[in-house]
Amino acid sequence: MSGNIPRLKKLYKETLVPALFKELGYRSVTQVPEVKKIVVSMGVGEAISNKKLLDSSVTDLSAITGQHAVKTKAKKSIANFKLRQGNEVGVMVTLRGARMYEFLDRLINVALPRVKDFRGIKVSGFDGHGNFSLGITEQIIFPEIDFDKIERIAGLNVNIVTSALTDSDARALLGKFGMPFRK
């Protein structure tokens, strides 16, 4: 990693903290919400029959996030899906610090504008505790993915965990970062 401060982190500290402090009416600057971590995951159900898909998903997710992805295992056996407890069925990455801000910047400013027929993000992704979940149907919207080298087009989930206590505060935070919510 370089010694540079990510653009969004600098924007947050210099501009967003004072603006959110004033807008949301907090008593202390430490109450202003911040992004704690971002968890990016892919479910690879077909990995039960084809292990090569899991390895290509690890490669894709590692390229997208800039951090090595780990394989996740099934917690329960489900007979209808031919799934056994302990089978590797997904990949995930937890981003914090500089990588988190760089990924958020790329997601908002590069990847989301590349989505076909994009009309904004639904606000129904908030969980009631200030965290936001977003589903992306194709990993090819990220410029790091070489379209010719992918095994299959797969979706991924992006969970943004914030320190906000309410959804409205978290929405204000993400909106200030430039998250394109639907009007």
Image: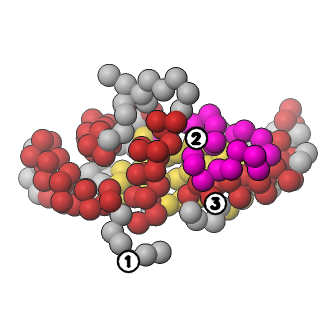
User: Is disc 2 surrounded by few (<14), some (14 to 19) or many (20+) residues within 10 Å?
Assistant: some
First to last magenta residue range:
133-154
User: CA separation, marks 1 and 2?
Assistant: 28 Å
Q: Is residue 141 magenta?
A: yes
The residue carrying mark 3 is 62
The residue carrying mark 2 is 141
The residue carrying mark 1 is 3
As helix, strand or loop, the secondary structure at mark 3 comes to helix
> Which mark is first along the chain, 2 or 1?
1
Q: Tell me the amino acid under the disc marked 2.
A: Ile
- Residue 26, percent from left and from top: 12, 49
Q: Is residue 58 above or below residue 133?
A: below
Q: Is residue 29 magenta?
A: no
- Where residue 59 sits, quadrant-wise, is bottom right
User: CA separation, marks 1 and 3?
Assistant: 21 Å
> Which mark is first along the chain, 3 or 1?
1
> Which mark is first along the chain, 2 or 3?
3
- Residue 99, percent from left and from top: 46, 63
Q: Are marks 3 and 2 in contact (CB under 8 Å)?
A: no
- Residue 17, percent from left and from top: 18, 54
Q: Are marks 1 and 3 in contact (CB under 8 Å)?
A: no
Residue at left 83%, top 42%?
A: 46
Residue at left 18%, top 59%?
A: 14
